[in-house]
Image (tube, rainbow, N blue to C red):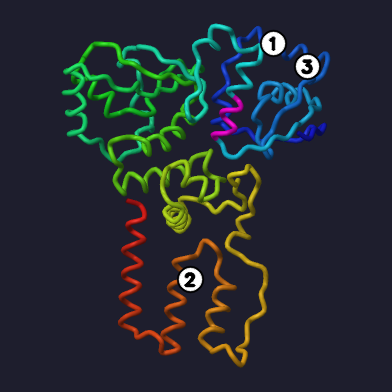
Amino acid sequence: MQTELTTRELTINPVLQSLLPPLLPDVFAGLEASIVTHGCLSPIVVWGDTIVDGHWRYAICRQHGLPFAVRRKEFECLADAMLWMYDNQCNQRNVERDQKNRSSADSEGFLSDTLMIAPTIIQTNLGTQVRMTLDEEAIDDYASAMRRGDAFPPILVFYDTGNDVYILVDGFHRYYAHQRAKPGELILVKRQYGNLESARWAAIGANKKNSVRRTNEDKKRAVEWALLHACGVKMSNRQIADHVGVDEITVRRARGRLETTATLSQSPERIGRDGRTIHTGNIGKRAEVPSATPTEKETDLECSLKNLVASVGNDDAEDFFVKAMDIFCRHNKLDQATATGIRQLLACQSNELIT
C-alpha cells in the first residue's frame, strides 16, 4: 500500500462510518490530545478517496489543521471494504473486549449482535419500508406459523446511538406477524449500529434477499430511493443495480426518468465498483473511429452496420437493435411490419427484465 502525507479533504461514506463503534467522550479526548501533541502517527486508510479506517483521526486532524498520512488500499466492492473494516476494528484497542466477543460480521460486513427487545421500542415509520405495500396474506401465514412454534430469523434493526432509537430495516412482515401472534412478547432482533441514513441505505438493498417476492413497483421504488440517497447519488448504474438486486438497464431507465423530471440532477462524476471516480460525460463514448467506406467485397449494408457498431456505446444494446433494424429496412432487408413487430417484442422483453 502506498503512503502519502497530505492535508486535503477526503470522502466519508456514511455507510462505512456507521460501522464504527462510538467512542466514549474520554477516549476521544485522549486520542485528540495525543494527536495534537505527537501528530497523527497512524495513516488514514482510503479506498480511492473514501476513508475505510481512521475516521476519528481524520476529523481531529481536519479540526486542528494537522497533516496526516494516507495509505491506499484496493477493494473489490463496498461489501469487501466493510468486511475489512470489521476485521481491522476487532484488532484495534478501541473495540472493547466484551463487544468484540459478542459481535459478528454478516454477509454485508456490519458490526452486529443478536438480542431480544420489546417490539414497541422499534421505529417502523422512519422511511425504511421500501415496499409499496405489505402482503397481508404473508403476514397472516407467518403469524400462524409463529403460533405453531416455528422459528424465524431475527429481524434487522439499526441502533442509532446518538438518538437512542431502534430503526426497523428488514423484516417488516415478520415484525407485524409477531405482533399478531405474540402481542406483548419480546422479539428476536439482529442489531447493527448506524444512523437513520445508513439504515435507509441498508433497507434499500435488504428486500432482494427476502422470501416475499417484490413487485415491479417495489423494485422501481427501491432503485429511485437508491439514486436519490446520499450513498447512491454518485454511484454507477451497475453499483446501484448490485445493491438493489435488479438489472443495470432498470437503473439506467430510472435515472433517466428522475433526470427528465428534474427530481435528480445529473452528477458530473460517479464512483465505480472499484472506488475510482468516473466522469459521466465519457460514459458510453468511444474513441473517434473514421467512417467506413465500402470495399469491393463489402456491401453497403455491411458498411452501415460496421459504422453503427463503432458509434454505439456498450450500454446501449436496445438502441443498437433499433438502429440496426432501421438500417435493414433502408436496405430492403426487412419490411416495416416485421420491424414494428420486433420493436414490440423488444419492449416486452425489456419490461420483463425487472420481474
Q: Position of residue 59 (x, y in %)?
A: 69, 24
Q: Earlier in the sequence, mark 2 or mark 3?
A: 3
Q: Secondary structure at mark 3?
A: helix
Residue 254 image label: none
Q: Nearer the viewer, residue 229 or 219?
A: 219
Residue beneath disc 2: 320
Q: Secondary structure at mark 2?
A: helix
Q: Secondary structure at mark 1?
A: helix
Q: Position of residue 310 (x, y in %)?
A: 59, 73
Q: Which residues are magenta?
A: 79-85
Q: Is residue 213 left or right of residue 256?
A: left
Q: Residue furthest bottom?
A: 296
Main SS of the magenta part reads helix
Q: Nearer the viewer, residue 332 or 202?
A: 332
Residue beneath disc 1: 29
Q: Is residue 174 magenta?
A: no
Q: Nearer the viewer, residue 293 or 162?
A: 293
Q: Amino acid at mark 1?
A: Ala
